[in-house]
């Protein structure tokens, strides 16, 4: 029997209320070599959300289940100009949490740019392919109403591409990362993607995911982000970790496999949850690596460059979720995509392809 849209929405609301209530009483978190355990999630809500996604002129890719048996999906916007002889760059958009993809992809400018923007450095190859793997309904270390909503799990940090064994315990790959892997591989298999130019664009929680993904996947050429909290330590994260390149000294550290990924991060001086100092600390940590290629830029509410965070919006490097200015002005700033920076974000990607493969 086909469920009518209104019935799907009603089921969605009822399931959300039930699941949010059920997750209020969670057991104490046991930290591991990969931070937190996988976050509680709802396959049912995820499936309903996917069924309501329209992809705004793109196609909904399905047919893949993650390790938990949850059906996963992605939106894909093809580009007929891409051929095996003239492959085009691939941009992977990782969305912000809470809001559905359809409500945010338009304001990023990517749907317009995908037909004519120069990401290849070749005037004969304008445009790009666009892919947006969809997140799940998961429990986040964010305040309500974002405590249980759409989003990517950046708290369980087994970001490798295969199962990892530590002290006799097997840790499976983070299923959100495995899903991104799957849909990138599916798109690349068409042989119409330029393998030197696979890029990430991330927003908020999706920006955090893009940082961690770029630091663990060498097929990613570069990432451009807006308003991304530190994926390794933000707010009341029960198991924060310090990213390191050497073997970790304790579970308080996480070894990343790549510290030289080119990452450009634009964020507000007054941002949601008072996250500006957190973004600054993340930049300092990454820039502390001699091989790092990190560029951070603070902007004010008018999208003008500025050199410091607004202290009245929060000064805690872990974030200030209950700061009144952060909850009002910061949230408003956060929800406004920095469209005057679109050209610079895309230029960063164009200027940072992977080197040619060694024969």
Image (spheres, helix red, strand yellow):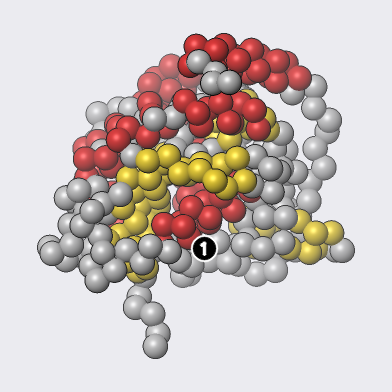
x and y percentages locating residue 291 in the rendered image: 46, 70
Residue 238 is drawn in which quadrant? top right
Tell which of 27 and 173 is nearer to you.
173
Determine the residue positioned at 70% across, 15% down: 18
Q: Is residue 74 left or right of residue 355?
A: right
Determine the residue positioned at 20% across, 48% down: 115
Label 1: which secondary element = loop
Specify the farthest residue to the right.
168
x and y percentages locating residue 183 in the rendered image: 48, 53
Tell which of 353 and 191 is nearer to you.
191
Determine the residue positioned at 43% across, 16% down: 328
Residue located beneath label 1 in the image? 217
Residue 57 is drawn in which quadrant? top left
Q: Can you see residue 303?
A: yes
x and y percentages locating residue 86 in the rendered image: 23, 67
Determine the residue positioned at 29% across, 68% down: 84
Name the quarter where the N terminus is drawn: top right
Q: Is residue 132 left or right of residue 117?
A: right
318, above or below 351, in the image: above
Name the quarter where the C terminus is drawn: bottom left
292, above or below 134, in the image: below
């Amino acid at each position: 029997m086909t469920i009518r849209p209104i019935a799907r929405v009603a089921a969605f609301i009822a399931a959300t209320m039930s699941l949010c209530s059920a997750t209020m009483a969670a057991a104490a978190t046991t930290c591991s070599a990969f931070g937190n355990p996988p976050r509680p999630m709802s396959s049912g809500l995820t499936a309903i959300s996917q069924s309501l996604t329209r992809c705004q002129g793109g196609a909904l890719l399905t047919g893949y289940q993650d390790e938990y048996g949850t059906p996963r999906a992605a939106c894909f916007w093809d580009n007929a100009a891409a051929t095996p002889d003239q492959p085009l760059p691939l941009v992977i958009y990782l969305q912000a949490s809470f809001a559905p993809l359809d409500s945010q992809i338009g304001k990023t400018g990517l749907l317009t740019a995908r037909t004519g923007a120069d990401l290849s450095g070749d005037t004969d190859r304008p445009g790009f392919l666009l892919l947006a793997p969809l997140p799940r309904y998961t429990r986040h270390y964010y305040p309500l109403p974002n405590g249980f909503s759409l989003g990517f799990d950046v708290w369980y940090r087994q970001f490798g591409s295969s199962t990892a064994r530590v002290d006799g315990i097997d840790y499976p790959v983070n299923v959100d990362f495995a899903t991104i892997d799957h849909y990138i591989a599916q798109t690349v298999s068409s042989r119409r993607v330029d393998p030197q130019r696979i890029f990430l664009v991330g927003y908020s929680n999706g920006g955090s995911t893009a940082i961690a993904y770029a630091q663990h996947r060498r097929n990613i050429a570069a990432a451009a982000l807006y308003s991304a909290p530190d994926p390794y330590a933000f707010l009341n994260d029960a198991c924060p970790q310090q990213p390191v390149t050497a073997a970790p000294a304790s579970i308080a550290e996480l070894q990343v496999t790549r510290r030289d990924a080119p990452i450009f991060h634009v964020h507000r001086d007054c941002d949601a949850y008072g996250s500006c100092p957190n973004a600054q600390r993340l930049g300092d940590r990454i820039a502390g690596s001699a091989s790092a290629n990190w560029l951070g830029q603070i902007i004010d509410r008018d999208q003008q460059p500025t050199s410091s965070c607004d202290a009245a919006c929060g000064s805690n490097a872990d974030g200030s979720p209950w700061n009144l200015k952060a909850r009002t002005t910061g949230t408003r700033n956060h929800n406004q995509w920095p469209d005057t920076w679109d050209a610079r974000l895309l230029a960063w990607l164009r200027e940072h392809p992977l080197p040619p493969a060694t024969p």
